[in-house]
Image (cartoon, rainbow, N blue to C red):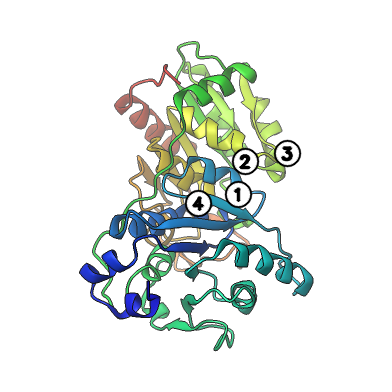
Amino acid sequence: MNLNSFISAPLEDATADRSGARVLIIPYMWIGDFVRCHTVVKLLRQRSPGTSIDMLTTSMVAPLLDYMPGVRKGIVADLPRRRLALKQHRALAHRLRAENYDQVLIMPRTWKAALAPWMAAIPWRTGFVGEGRFGLINDLRFGERRLPRMADRCAALALAKGEHTPNQWPLPELKVPTAECAGWRRRLGLASDGRPVVALAPGAVGPAKRWPAAFYADLARRLTAEGHWIWVIGGPNEKEVATEIAAAGDIRDLTGPDLRNAILALAAADVAISNDSGLLHVAAAFGTPAVGIFGPTSPWHWAPLNPIAAVVETTDDLPCRPCHKPVCRLGHHRCMLGISVDRVALSVRQAIARTPTRTSL
């Protein structure tokens, strides 16, 4: 198969030519961006079901691949973020060369992201222009700045060069076998007792995107009193806030270093409540009704492609919003403090009322 002809060929011809190709996707390694890249997987599979698709991953996000239909396997590589680590890139290149990939789609714009694929001599290396990558990328794409959403930028690399982006991308999708979810619940003592389960995801990258812990604790207290079972999920950085929330009643703290706990909790929950974070994308990709709390960020830019039950934002007129900054530059945090517990609780009640309790999970 000639990948050069594939990139420039019309869609109807490209699908036939691509049969049997081996493609590696190098995504961004944040949870939400990693989930977004399942759109790329589905797009490639729709166009040519015979394409074999792998994803580069870190140890932290690797559990997501177990629930991503269409991905053959993950290539785990925990490369340092702040230094070149040439030896580790060479080792990764050796592993990639053994897989005989025909093409690699490189989502990050960094020079380092393209290094191992170039060293592995993957024939077709597709990516946007960035950080002087001429030569490392031999299928250079332009026009990234005309694509305002991260989802559009990632998925556009799976299109033929010059092809217009569609009005609607394939939606990310995660699937957990019912038996696995049930076994996980038994092991953790989370067997269904008839109460609707509400999963709280109070973490986010940067304090500006976090609804206050005291607000989450108040919400948890109210929902517990109304007969809901509250699970708090997140990574090790959320342990302190989870402890504060768990003090509000019969609440399970499921935070910790294993992302799989959060994944399975979101698959089993009746409703999820999350800041603008990766776990909101996980919930949406499962089809779990999710309430997203947005402060400094724009839901149009950063909410999941999948429908969610509700977006809650402040009703205050704030000229500084959206700033898309991880730390409030003005120090007042009004975009989050202006979102009342009453408003979020109402959104949760409405979502629960529309959703049958998932007793089978």
Q: Is residue 343 above or below residue 50?
A: above
For label 2, the SS is: helix
The disc, 2 or 1, on the residue closer to the chain's N-terminal end is: 1
Percent coordinates x, y for residue 187 in the rendering: 64, 19
- Amino acid of disc 4: Asp
* Mark 2 and mark 1 residues within 8 Å of each other at the beta carbon: yes
Residue ranking furthest to the left? 12
Alpha carbon separation for disc pair 3 and 4: 19 Å
Q: Which mark is residue 259?
A: 2
Determine the residue positioned at 28% across, 70% down.
14
**Residue at image mark 1:** 61
The answer to whether any part of residue 248 appears in the image is no
Q: Is residue 351 above or below residue 111?
A: above
Alpha carbon separation for disc pair 2 and 3: 17 Å
- Amino acid of disc 1: Val
Few, some or many residues within 10 Å of mark 4 (<14, 14–19, 20+): many
**Residue at image mark 4:** 276
The quarter of the rendered structure image containing the C terminus is top left
Q: Which mark is residue 240?
A: 3
Front: mark 2 or 4: 2
Q: Is residue 188 above or below residue 108?
A: above
- Amino acid of disc 3: Glu
